[in-house]
Amino acid sequence: MHAGHIVAGMDTKQVWVVLGDPVRKTQFKRSQTDVWLYRAHSLQQDHYRLGTQGVRLIFVKDRLVVIEPM
């Protein structure tokens, strides 16, 4: 967290502390899934060189399970 990186397994609070507010949040209560969208430049580890494109973070039961470029 100190280096500004996120990894699978982090909870929503930890990701929020590192990245701040997402551009958009969607919650699916039945499946206990949250989807947060960020601009790629918000992530310190932009390995895909996405620039202003988006990154989708998917949380299941409050844990980050997917970091997906869009």
Image (tube, rainbow, N blue to C red):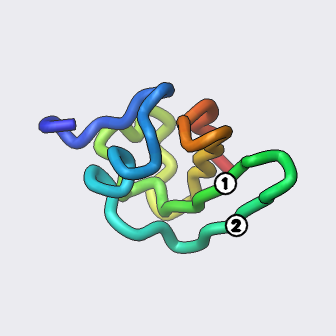
Tag 1, which secondary structure? strand
Compared with 48, 15 (above or below) is below
Name the residue carrying label 1: 34
| In-image side of 28 versus 9 (left or right) | right
The span from disc 1 to disc 2 (Cα, nearest Å) is 6 Å
Compared with 10, 16 (above or below) is below
Tag 2, which secondary structure? strand
List the single residue furthest toward the left.
2
Label placed on residue 7: none
Residue occupying image coordinates x 59% and y 47% = 57
Label placed on residue 26: 2
**Picture coordinates of residue 11, whole percent (x, y):** 44, 40
The quadrant of the rendering that contains the N terminus is top left
**Picture coordinates of residue 47, whole percent (x, y):** 43, 32
**Picture coordinates of residue 26, whole percent (x, y):** 70, 66
| In-image side of 63 versus 41 (left or right) | right
For mark 2, does the 10 Å Cα neighbourhood hold few (<14), some (14 to 19), or many (20 or more) residues?
few
Residue occupying image coordinates x 62% and y 51% = 56
